[in-house]
Amino acid sequence: MSAAVKDVQRSVFLELIRSHPEMTLAELSKLSKGQFSGLLSSITVGDVINMSADSAEAPASADDSAPSLAEEVNTRTAAGRREYDARVLEFVENAPEPVSATEIRNVVGGTSLQVRKSVARLIEAERVTWQGKARGTRYSAL
């Protein structure tokens, strides 16, 4: 296999890892067995961090008002969590009927885990309530 093909495979694999920040190290280690073992053994934590930093420095698009499904949000800091929670709460408050976590994620951005944690914080703060279970769970403002 040519070096160019290996470089492309490595880049795609790095992007895949970076696009799923909710992936645990245990899940990642499962990839070390099988067809991805060669790729994973050549990737360092620094590669993943540097790639994330490079994409964070990319210029913002002209339309920042509507986050895309894949948009990353910062929930690592208290300020980032407050900002994200405010965006989630605003969406839930403005919704004409109770909304699902998927609907929140599609409009506000972030990962499934970030949405779940955000609505959990809002429920604890008594700003949001829920009805249903599992995929049928719907959220509405209090």
Image (cartoon, rainbow, N blue to C red):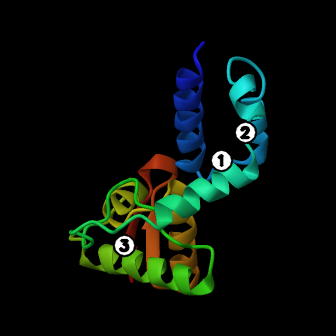
Q: Quadrant of residue 95?
A: bottom left
Amino acid carrying label 3: it is Ser
Give percent across and percent down for residue 67. 31, 64
> Which residue corresponds to mark 1?
23
Amino acid carrying label 1: it is Met
Q: CA distance from mark 3 to mark 1?
A: 28 Å
Give percent across and percent down for residue 109. 39, 62
Q: Position of 62 compared to 87: left or right?
A: left
Badge 3 or badge 1: first in the primary sequence: 1
Q: Circles 2 and 1: CB distance less than 8 Å?
A: yes
> Which residue corresponds to mark 3?
140
Badge 3 or badge 2: first in the primary sequence: 2
Q: Circles 3 and 1: CB distance less than 8 Å?
A: no
> Which residue corresponds to mark 2?
27
- 10 Å crowding of disc 2: few (<14), some (14-19), many (20+): few
Q: Position of 64 compared to 111: left or right?
A: left
- Give the numbered dot on residue 73: none
Q: Quadrant of the C terminus?
A: bottom left
Amino acid carrying label 2: it is Glu
